[in-house]
């Protein structure tokens, strides 16, 4: 096995010129040097601002322009055009810590290893945002990671280092989804028991929270993707991941199809599940404590952020 594989970092960008240079700089600062950086401009209508940023780096960056097709389309273009053995995704407004790729490559022991790290949050000025990070560690199978995901472990798409050949097995990103295409991909990967997910506690990716994010403007579209997940995955997850505990399955129902959804979206997702022979009453009964827990977390987060704001004003 190659101990020094070429890693392709794919950066899809749409109207992201403001933060793009910082993202690119974080990839060029990687301590692991056998990398290629592929920026896919997804038809940004910004009078060439995105293109000027990328071209200013010369031949350090591979630049691809395409007609607007969404994040999934841009990622798939990057996967198609990449030359590396491994795929790593970076959003145009986020960052890698300098040792991200080096530390992940060092953990590869088998061609079917998928490496996953955790990350931190910053605001638009790169000021850290305090938050609790659940981490995993060690060589885990798909069922172990899947159960961790159900119980509030966040699968951060930027934290993955994925062997290119895996896309030949599970397919590329679903271009019909606009916001949950990463979750759809991770669920597909977790349905296979051939892969080992190597988890590390290191916080090696930095997610920026800012007002201009597309994810801050979603509503109905998010629920459309949620319903697609219900149709596409719920009926086969039980067989593929071999979940025998129905309570766990019902927790998954809550996390995927209820948490954060609007009423029409929840009702439609519920119909999909009911039509597949699942007891919606039981699901709702088991999901209720998690709903209450989510509401309590939301209130505590609101109070905490308010206290931070007051503290900042006084200082």
Image: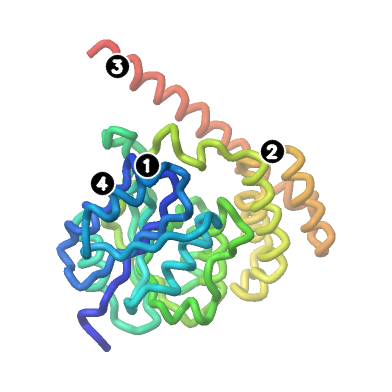
Mark 3–mark 2 Cα distance, whole angstroms, equals 34 Å
Disc sitting over residue 241 in the figure? none
Q: Residue at x 44, y 32 (%)?
A: 211
- SS category of the residue bearing label 4: helix
Q: Which of marks 3 and 2 is nearer the N terminus?
A: 2
Residue bearing mark 2: 262
**Tag 3–tag 4 contact (CB < 8 Å):** no
Q: Earlier in the sequence, mark 1 or mark 4?
A: 4
Q: In which quarter of the image is residue 31?
A: bottom left
Mark 2–mark 4 Cα distance, whole angstroms, equals 35 Å
**Tag 2–tag 1 contact (CB < 8 Å):** no
Q: Which residue is drawn at 45% across and 74% down?
A: 80
Q: Earlier in the sequence, mark 3 or mark 4?
A: 4
- SS category of the residue bearing label 2: loop
Q: Earlier in the sequence, mark 2 or mark 1?
A: 1
Q: Nearer the viewer, mark 2 or mark 1?
A: 2
Mark 1–mark 3 Cα distance, whole angstroms, equals 20 Å
Mark 1–mark 4 Cα distance, whole angstroms, equals 25 Å
Q: Nearer the viewer, mark 3 or mark 2?
A: 2
């Amino acid at each position: 096995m190659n101990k020094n594989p070429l890693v392709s970092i794919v950066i899809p960008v749409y109207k992201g010129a403001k933060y793009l240079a910082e993202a690119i700089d974080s990839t060029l600062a990687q301590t692991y040097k056998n990398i290629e950086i592929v920026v896919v401009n997804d038809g940004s209508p910004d009078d060439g601002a995105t293109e000027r940023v990328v071209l200013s780096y010369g031949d350090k960056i591979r630049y691809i322009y395409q007609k607007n097709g969404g994040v999934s389309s841009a990622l798939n273009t990057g996967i198609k055009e990449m030359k590396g053995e491994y795929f790593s995704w970076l959003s145009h407004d986020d960052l890698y810590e300098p040792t991200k790729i080096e530390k992940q490559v060092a953990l590869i022991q088998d061609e079917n290893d998928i490496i996953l790290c955790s990350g931190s949050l910053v605001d638009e000025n790169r000021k850290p945002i305090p938050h609790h990070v659940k981490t995993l560690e060690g060589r885990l199978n798909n069922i172990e990671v899947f159960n961790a995901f159900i119980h509030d472990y966040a699968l951060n798409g930027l934290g993955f280092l994925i062997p290119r050949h895996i896309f030949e097995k599970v397919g590329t990103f679903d271009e019909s989804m606009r916001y949950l295409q990463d979750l759809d991909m991770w669920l597909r990967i977790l349905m296979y028991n051939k892969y080992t997910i190597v988890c590390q506690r290191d916080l090696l990716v930095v997610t920026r929270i800012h007002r201009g994010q597309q994810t801050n403007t979603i509503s109905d579209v998010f629920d459309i993707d949620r319903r697609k997940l219900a149709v596409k995955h719920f009926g086969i997850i039980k067989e593929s991941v071999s979940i025998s505990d129905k309570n766990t399955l019902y927790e998954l129902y809550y996390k995927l199809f209820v948490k954060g959804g609007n009423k029409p979206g929840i009702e439609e997702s519920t119909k999909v599940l009911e039509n597949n022979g699942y007891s919606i009453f039981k699901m709702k009964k088991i999901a209720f404590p998690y709903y209450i827990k989510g509401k309590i977390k939301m209130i505590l987060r609101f109070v905490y952020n308010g206290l931070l704001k007051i503290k900042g004003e006084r200082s």
